[in-house]
Image (tube, grey):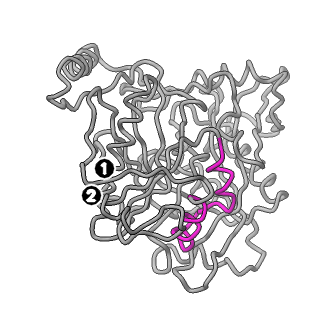
Amino acid sequence: MSLNISEENLSTYDNTNKKTEEIVVRQYDEEKDKLAVEELEGQCDFGQRGQPSLFTDLMGDPISRIRNLPLHVMLVAEYGNDGDIVGVIRGCIKTVTRGNNGSTPCPVYVKIAYVLGLRVSSHHRRLGIGTKLVENLEEWSKINGAKYAYMATDSSNEASIKLFIWKCSYVKFRTPSVLVQPVHAHYKPVASDIAIVRVSPQLSESFYRRIFANSEFFPKDIDHILDNKLNFGTFMAVPKKTLLNWDPKSGSFPQTFAILSVWNTKEVYKLQVRGVSSLKYACCLGTRVLDSWMPWLRVPSIPNIFKMFGFYLLYGIHMEGKDGPRLMKSLYAFAHNMGRNDKECRLLVSEVGFDDPVKEAIPRWNKFSWGDLWCMKKLDVNELSTDDNWMESQVSNSSSVIFVDPRDF
């Protein structure tokens, strides 16, 4: 998920007015900091001035977005004699694959830190607060064994890119695509010759470890993700005739199939679009009313994203065989119908590598979708290790497949 920072709420690029020595960065204390952090978060809508903005509601749990990772931290920045909290940042550490294009028989793993949830008060600009928060999180990451740190942001977010690349020495690394499909009022049919099979967490783990062995960012603890209560399940689409000769419990792959898992982000946080005109609001409402009254028309209605809503993240997306694209579309129709039956789910969201072959088979609305930018930094530039060529192989040796960890969203 993108790390969104706006020009209005980012304190970054110089400290000509104040000294960074007045800033104290420490770990978040839930008992004493929760109210102040919630107030700060409430001030941060994402979007360009004069345009609709996106508000994130963490539902009273400031560390909800990192709570599902075993090693995580939240830092706060205090400023002035009163110790006002003027900035926060979150981070987590996990072990992931770095991609090897099949050059070795086994996956190559590396310990990596993920930087997310950076917020700085709009009243404390140009004090170096954002930079200091990032530096302290990087130091915590190094102490805990991380070799790299990475972050994700909207590719058009100039403020975020300036901070991480210009000030913190990150480099542009990957450019995945975030694909968004609205959940409509009408039901999406699944082709009658296609079967949707629910795959057990144990078998899903086996499948995923084989499918994504040569990908990048595949988490070593995939079993913890699949067993998490937020995971709604893993589903595979196959031609019905395949079931005559294939047993899902056998552990073997059918000749052609599509697979994905569904993650329930609405139990972690909710979103709300703010600042739309009355005319746009009325038009969106009209599409929903028409779709609800006459679902057989299959009107491409716009769900109510102007009140708090949740979404399903679809991950572990893969297809094989000549029928793969058609099977994937049916699998997305199945996931859409899951969301349709959940009154709080308004969107289906996926993120895949820019050149991932599965990308073209994923239904989405281009107006709702965007290009992401992942930036990375080697934390100890003096240390030599076998994974040194990962950042150097940005294009020629990189995998087209990126596994998006749902806990990062």
Decide if residue 26 is on the left or right side of residue 129.
right
Q: Nearer the viewer, residue 165 or 144?
A: 144
* Location of residue 198 with respect to 324 vertically, above or below: above
Q: Is residue 338 left or right of residue 326?
A: right
Task: Check if residue 220 falls in the magenta segment.
Answer: yes
Q: Position of residue 203 (x, y in %)?
A: 58, 60
Image quarter where the C terminus lies is top right
Q: Is residue 62 above or below residue 162?
A: above
Q: Which residues are magenta?
A: 204-228
Residue depicted at x 39% and y 42%? 335
- As measured in the structure, the alpha-carbon distance from the residue carrying label 1 to the one carrying label 2 is 6 Å
Residue 165 position within the rendered picture, expressed as x and y whole percent measured from the top left: 57, 56
Label 1 amino acid? Ser
> For the point 61% across and 32% down, which residue is it?
268
Question: Is 55 in front, or is 289?
Answer: 289
Q: Mark 2 = which residue?
A: 326
Residue 55 in the magenta stretch? The answer is no
In the picture, residue 35 is in which quadrant?
top right
Residue at image mark 1: 330
* Cβ atoms at labels 1 and 2 below 8 Å apart: yes
Question: Which of the 4 image quarters holds residue 47?
Answer: top left
Picture coordinates of residue 215, whole percent (x, y): 53, 69
Taking depth in this image into account, of 206 and 23 the one nearest to the observer is 206
Residue 367 is labelled as none
Residue at figure coordinates x 30%, y 54% from the top left: 194
The secondary structure type at the circle numbered 2 is helix
